Image (cartoon, rainbow, N blue to C red):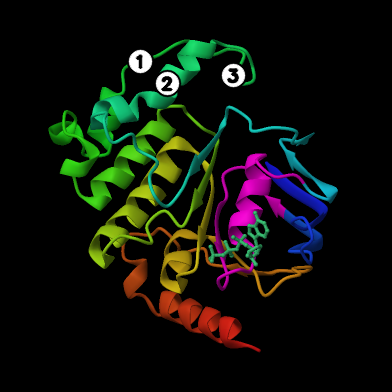
Amino acid sequence: MLEFQRVTFHYRHGTPIFLDFNWRVEKGDAWAVLGPSGCGKSTLLALAAGLLFPTQGQVLVEGQPLTRPRPHTGLIIQDYGLLPWATVRENAALGLRVRNFYGADGIHAPKDYVPRTDVTPWLERLGLLEVANQFPSQISGGQRQRTAIARTLALEPDLLLMDEPFSSLDAPTREGLQMLVMELWADQRLTLVLVTHAIEEAAMVGKRILVLGNPPNTQALVVDNPGAGEPNYRTTPEYQAICQFLREVLNRP
Ligand SMILES: Nc1ncnc2c1ncn2[C@@H]1O[C@H](COP(=O)(O)OP(=O)(O)OP(=O)(O)O)[C@@H](O)[C@H]1O
């Protein structure tokens, strides 16, 4: 689904963040990308989204080199990106309105796109119907993030990229949304890549966990975590062991 082939990337005048870096995400995988601040997690996601391009090497999605953002990739970032003057329903429908405006051009929308406007099923699925006519300032952080998720899922992505989506939320809300994302991942047959600096979040959401270190990243560590997303996984010895292992890895000099 997504492949980094010998990717080298550096910002202008900077040292490389990635150097000859390879990574392969299969269709339907759920990955968490974990690492300390400044290791290159957001950069990796921007490369996967077609917002940045490798200095050398290439990023492929479905076997095609990425030359621009693709309409089937959804991106969710930390601060929700909601319009303050639009209601929850209007915010959730924003992506569809933009897509309908451009039509089925293969750039902003898939070539076979049929215009849609009704986001009610998504509002219902994400528990937002009762706040659909409220504005972002009138709802909680968790509801705002669910609105951003509704807006993205309404576009029916096959690849969902999330950059620290829950880091500003309190622990119970965060844990609820982690479970929701894993339910949606299973229901919608998504390929998921979630970037986080939180070990517990990586262990809860990543069936595979990519651990980045201080740049340049050449060969990143991959940790298998097949229990991620199971309803009671957080209470199991396997979860505790993965968290402990990741803690040790991140504390290595
Ligand atoms: N536009 C830019 N120009 C120059 N350097 C940048 C730019 N964006 C990021 N960097 C640098 O690249 C490195 C990787 O940044 P990135 O944001 O990808 O890391 P991160 O792991 O997501 O960090 P955090 O967890 O703090 O968000 C950092 O040293 C950062 O300062």
Q: Which mark is residue 171?
A: none
Q: Amino acid under label 2?
A: Leu
Is there CB contact under 8 Å for labels 2 and 3?
no
Does the beta carbon at disc 1 come under 8 Å from ligand 1? Answer: no
Q: Position of residue 163 (x, y in %)?
A: 50, 53
- Nearer mark to the viewer, of 2 and 3: 2
Residue that appears at 37% across and 57% down: 166
Please report whichever mark, 1 or 2, sits nearer to the chain's N-terminal start: 2
Q: Which mark is residue 117?
A: 1
Q: Which mark is residue 96?
A: 2
Q: Amino acid under label 1?
A: Thr
Label 1 crowd (10 A; few <14 / some 14-19 / many >=20): some
User: Is label 1 in a helix, a strand or a loop?
Assistant: loop
Q: Is residue 196 visible?
A: yes
Is there CB contact under 8 Å for labels 1 and 2?
yes
- Near-viewer residue (102 or 235): 102
Q: Is residue 32 rendered magenta in the image?
A: yes
In the shown orientation, is residue 118 left or right of residue 239? left
Q: Position of residue 248 (x, y in %)?
A: 56, 86
Q: Which mark is residue 110?
A: 3
